[in-house]
Image: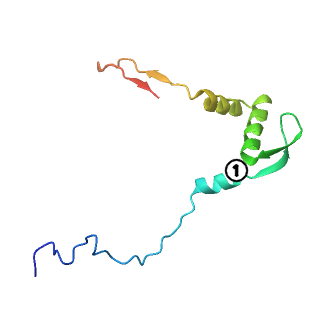
Amino acid sequence: MGEFPNKATQFSKTNQPPNESKRVSKIHAKTILDRFLSIEKNMQNPLNGELENMSIAELMHLKQIANAMQGDLAAYKEIIDRFEGKTIQRVEEKTTETGNEGAIINW
């Protein structure tokens, strides 16, 4: 046996394996969602009731707004979180009987 690594069998610019493997294309969820959410159709706007040419994504956003306007607090919270960003919740833990100091946790 020769030295390790064997320079004759080591890969270099000229000594490369043949590209026999086929690349497998994977369709990711984002690709699928982009495709279907961008479909445009003539649909009824849930806010004003008029027919408009809009994408599925636009319709979904409008329905979320319409739900919030009808009193759906979860829909309202989602809109505010998306629009203004989620609030930081601060939790303070008081000193325990063992004398350990409380921790402040920011979420």
- Horizontal and vertical percent position of residue 43: 85, 46
Quarter where residue 81 is shown: top right
Quarter where residue 67 is shown: top right
Secondary element at tag 1? helix
Q: Residue at x 16, y 75 (%)?
A: 6
On screen, residue 102 versus residue 61, left or right, reads left
Residue 22, compared with residue 68, is above or below; it is: below
Q: Residue at x 65, y 53 (%)?
A: 33
User: 29 or 68, which is in the foreground?
Assistant: 29
Q: Which residue is identified by label 1?
A: 37
Q: Residue at x 89, y 39 (%)?
A: 50
Query: Residue type at mark 1?
Result: Leu
User: 102 or 9, which is in the foreground?
Assistant: 9
On screen, residue 64 versus residue 103, left or right, reads right
Locate the N terminus by quadrant. Answer: bottom left
- Horizontal and vertical percent position of residue 39: 74, 52
